[in-house]
Amino acid sequence: MDKATKEKAKEKLSKMAYLVGYPGKFRTYEFAVDNKNWAATALAARAFDFNYKMAKVGKPVDRERWGMSPPTVNAYYRGTLNHMVFPAGILQPPFFDVKAHVPVNLGAMGMVVGHELTHGFDDKGSKFDGQGNLQNWWTDTVRKQFTDRTDCMVKQYGSYEVLPGVKQDGKLTLGENIADNAGVMLAFQAYRSLRKDAPELLEAGGFNEDQQFFLSVGQVWCTVMTDDYARLRAGTDTHSHPRFRVNGSLSNFPAFAEAFQCKVGSPMRRADACTVW
Ligand SMILES: [Zn+2]
């Protein structure tokens, strides 16, 4: 980024809101539930939700409105509101544990926070200002440099095979892959900075703190799915297969290679590593 765009990015960051746990105001659902008539209940729910949305037309934007319920194990960034939301559901193991060591929490929940934050500054985030209004704050030069760098990631992820003969779509998943790569980097910097004055570094199960961080990144994306589901997601999901969310971003990241002494060109240390941020 050039200097002027960097200033705009900092201004946007200063206006970004962090909503954590649960909303200040809980949403209520006032419609009749008929235990004997599913269709009537479904129609009543739809009518209620339609009126709820219509009532917002012409009113000021509700900046505190959540798009996820508190027990949801997920998180999001919304460009039109310039806020990140981390429901209580994701703030539990394996993502976060008050009893877990700093590198473990940062490799897991920290990576998610870094991921969401980055969405405010990617190709989509560049189109919304600090207030969430549709306003491009990137220059043409910045956008060109960004695209040049992202082409590397389109190729990298497009070469991954989810199942024999089923490739990951490098373009479809680009935004999420950028966020995964930057999320790992931001979380790693945050973990190192939190531990920089630590009187003693802690080993766990023979793993040093850097290794604990990276194991934690891998741990949160442990997933079991059927081949059919993996195939469906490869064609529709903007997120890469969990295996590549981990291996894709860590094989680009020099600190990972150092932590596990991976040789240049080995599967987890790409010779032509991609960096966007
Ligand atoms: Zn994302």
Image (cartoon, grey):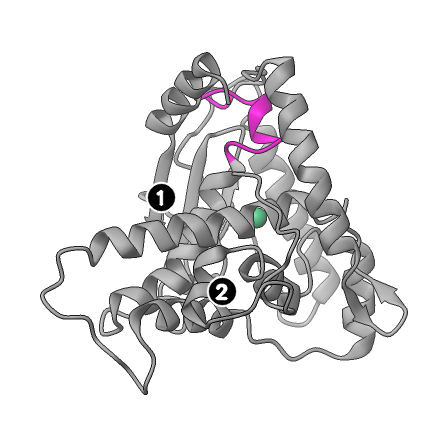
Report the predominant secondary structure element of the magenta stretch: loop
Residue at the spot 62% in from the left edge and 51% down from the top edge? 273
**Element carrying mark 1:** strand
How far is disc 1 from disc 2 in space, using C-alphas? 34 Å
| Amino acid at dot 2 | Ala
- Quick check: can you spot residue 237? no
Position of residue 127 relative to residue 149, above or below, is above
- Quick check: can you spot residue 9? yes
Closest to the camera, between mark 1 and mark 2, is 2
Q: Which residue lies furthest to the bottom in this view?
A: 205
- Which residue, given by chain and number where applicable, does mark 1 sit on? 19
Q: How many labels sit on residues?
A: 2
Instruction: Where is residue 256? Give x, y as percent.
Output: 46, 63
Q: Which residue lies furthest to the right in this view?
A: 165
State the residue in front, 194 or 20. 194
State the residue in front, 200 or 224. 200
**Element carrying mark 2:** helix
Residue 171 lies in what quarter of the image?
A: top right
Instruction: Where is residue 194? Give x, y as percent.
Output: 21, 54
Q: Which of marks 1 and 2 is nearer the N terminus?
A: 1
Residue at the spot 78% in from the left edge and 72% down from the top edge? 229
For residue 257, the mark is 2
Q: State which region is magenta.
A: 120-132
Q: Specify whether 260 is left or right of 35.
A: left
Q: Residue furthest left?
A: 199
Q: Specify whether 102 is left or right of 269.
A: left
Mark 1 and mark 2 in contact? Answer it, CB < 8 Å.
no
Residue 108 is one of the magenta-drawn residues: no
| Amino acid at dot 1 | Leu
